[in-house]
Image (tube, helix red, strand yellow):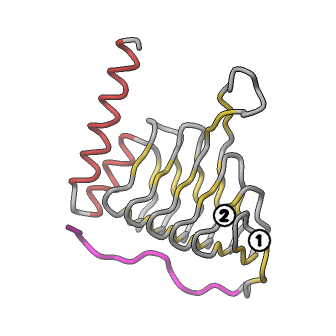
């Protein structure tokens, strides 16, 4: 392993640790914006959220990213406004081509539309786009694009309903600190 790669990994671990131990939400939001990408106003990122690379991250306004989420931003993640990502969600943007004899790395940007809601334990695979207002039920594995306002469930996730298009709530829960 090269020294440059080792140094980058150490810096990444230090940055993730700094984000985790920072218990004021606004300070954490600013820290993530400085180190990892753009985080909009009114967005709350809870503790123990793991980011995989510097940059390639855009989170809109009034979003919530709960505890113990993995955001694999190496291939790029774009999260719209008013999005709720519940605890223990995993968003992957890179993996290996299992049909390639060398198992080459493949990547795909993940896009999550405005007003989407990911329940706990959701897994999103590389290259997926989740439409505006879509809901993904707990424990679902999203392997394909999700239409706007679709309600998805299962492994792999399948459409089980359609959500009412009128969304009046805010996914921003303005608390000031967490322990």
x then y, percent, for residue 107: 66, 36
Residue at position x 72%, y 34% in the image: 98
Of helix, strand and loop, which one carries label 2? Answer: loop
Residue at position x 35%, y 20% in the image: 6
Instruction: From the viewer's side, name the closer residue of 12 and 169.
Output: 12
Q: Is residue 173 magenta?
A: yes
10 Å neighbourhood of mark 1: few (<14), some, or many (≥20)?
many
The total of numbered circles placed on residues is: 2
Q: Is residue 83 left or right of residue 12?
A: right
Marks 2 and 1, how far apart at CA: 8 Å
Instruction: Examine the rendered structure and indicate whether residue 6 appears above or below residue 162.
Output: above
Q: Which residues are magenta?
A: 166-179
x then y, percent, for residue 131: 73, 65
The circle on residue 132 is none
Instruction: Examine the rendered structure and indicate whether residue 114 appears above or below residue 92.
Output: below
Instruction: Examine the rendered structure and indicate whether residue 73 appears above or below residue 112.
Output: above
Q: Which residue corresponds to mark 1?
A: 148
Q: Are marks 2 and 1 in contact (CB under 8 Å)?
A: yes
10 Å neighbourhood of mark 2: few (<14), some, or many (≥20)?
many
Q: Which quadrant: the N terminus?
A: top left
Instruction: From the viewer's side, name the closer residue of 118 and 79.
Output: 118
Residue at position x 40%, y 49% in the image: 50
Q: Which quadrant: the C terminus?
A: bottom left
Q: Which residue corresponds to mark 2?
A: 113
Judged by its main secondary structure, the magenta piece is loop
Tell me which corner region of the image, top left, top right, bottom left or bottom right, holds residue 24: bottom left
Instruction: Examine the rendered structure and indicate whether residue 166 appears above or below residue 39.
Output: below
Q: Is residue 47 left or right of residue 130?
A: left
Q: Is residue 15 left or right of residue 92?
A: left
């Amino acid at each position: 392993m090269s020294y440059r790669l080792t140094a980058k990994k150490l810096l990444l671990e230090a940055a993730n640790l700094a984000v985790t131990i920072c218990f004021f939400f606004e300070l954490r939001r600013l820290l993530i914006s400085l180190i990892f990408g753009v985080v909009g106003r009114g967005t709350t990122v809870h503790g123990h959220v793991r980011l995989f690379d510097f940059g390639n991250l855009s989170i809109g306004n009034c979003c919530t990213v709960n505890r113990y989420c993995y955001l694999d931003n190496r291939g790029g993640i774009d999260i719209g406004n008013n999005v709720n990502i519940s605890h223990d969600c995993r968003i992957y943007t890179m993996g290996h081509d299992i049909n390639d004899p060398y198992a080459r790395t493949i990547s795909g940007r993940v896009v999550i539309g405005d007003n989407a809601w990911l329940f706990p334990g959701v897994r999103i695979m590389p290259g997926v786009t989740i439409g505006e207002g879509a809901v993904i039920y707990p424990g679902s594995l999203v392997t394909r694009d999700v239409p706007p306002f679709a309600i998805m469930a299962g492994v792999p996730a399948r459409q089980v309903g359609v959500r009412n298009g009128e969304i009046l709530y805010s996914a921003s829960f303005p608390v000031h600190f967490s322990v």
